[in-house]
Image (cartoon, rainbow, N blue to C red):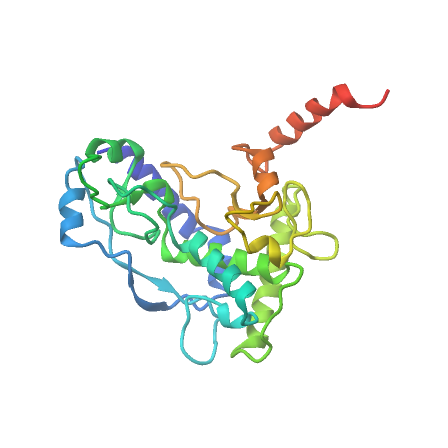
Amino acid sequence: MSSTTHQEFNKTVTDYATSATATHYENLMCKKPSGCNVGKSTPQEDVYASEVEGFTKRDLQKKRCVLPIGHVGRCSCNLKKFFKKDSAHDKTTGKIDTSVFSTTGNDEYAYKNRASRCYQNTFTAEEERSIRDKKIKKKCGIPLKEYSTPNAMSDCYLDWIVYLWCTIGVEVNTECPNYEAIVSMLTLHKQFIINHFASLNRSVFDSEGNTICCVTRKQMTIQDFVVDRINISDSDVQFGHIRSSSDNCLTIKGMNTVVMCRRGNLIIGERLFTENVWLNELRAILIPYETK
């Protein structure tokens, strides 16, 4: 087992949990355990997972409440009731839930398909290959690079709720419980996001406070969130990472994902949004075409 890789990854989990960024979220959200356990492995899955040399099972965890501190009523691990109840808004909030809390699709020969990001069994790419068998779908683990903790996922989720809240065409339910407290929480967090990216000479909102693709600077609309898998569009919203998924680093956390449209994601590729490499490459491409 790549114990060093797991140790490196786990250190980034601890580092994030004790960071000033994480403290900011702790001061906004309730964060009490909410709902039932998630990511629980079965005995048979553990048998398959134990084929990985040095396999260690992670602790069972619960999602966290994302309502404001001091909220009234029961805890909740989502803010769906804050938004208008209709097909477009339901699809949009569902897309955010899936992107934040679930892993990507897999063929299930070793990695599970669309599992919880805090599933107990995690494998590096090398470990997955070591137990992969095309004769049986073991579906007994998730990629280490896609793992996250309930606290870090809650932080990432709040980022996306702010992005959605500031998207053109999105409507809220002013009658939802804790409405004013939620608006206050989102307002404070939006300013935190603005300040964070301004310090890096980047923007994720336009001058009017609307959510934009951080690469192309296109204003995003609710229809851009409602992705049609058959009729794809350059403006389709995608889950853009700043630091890409890696077996060495926690990436599903606060301030590491941004709104990118399909075209913007294609342009930036694996470059870091917060560094100038991608911008310099674009400038170099334009030089031969500039009017003299």
Pick the residue in front: 35 or 181: 35
Above or below 264: residue 46: below
Q: Give the residue displayed 47% in from the left and 76% down from the top.
A: 70
Tell which residue pokes out farthest to the front in this image.
230
| 41 relative position to 149: left or right | left
Q: What is the number of callouts on the image? A: 0
Above or below 48: residue 22: below
Please provide percent x and percent y for residue 73: 43, 80
Above or below 175: residue 225: above
| 53 relative position to 188: left or right | left
Regarding residue 68, the answer to whether it shows in the image is no
Q: Quadrant of residue 107?
A: top left
Q: Give the residue displayed 18% in from the left and 43% down from the top.
A: 49
The quadrant of the picture occupied by the C terminus is top right
Please provide percent x and percent y for residue 119: 29, 52
Regarding residue 55, the answer to whether it shows in the image is yes
Please provide percent x and percent y for residue 231: 56, 47
The quadrant of the picture occupied by the N terminus is top left
Q: Give the residue displayed 32% in from the left and 48% down from the top.
A: 113
Q: Quadrant of residue 202?
A: top right
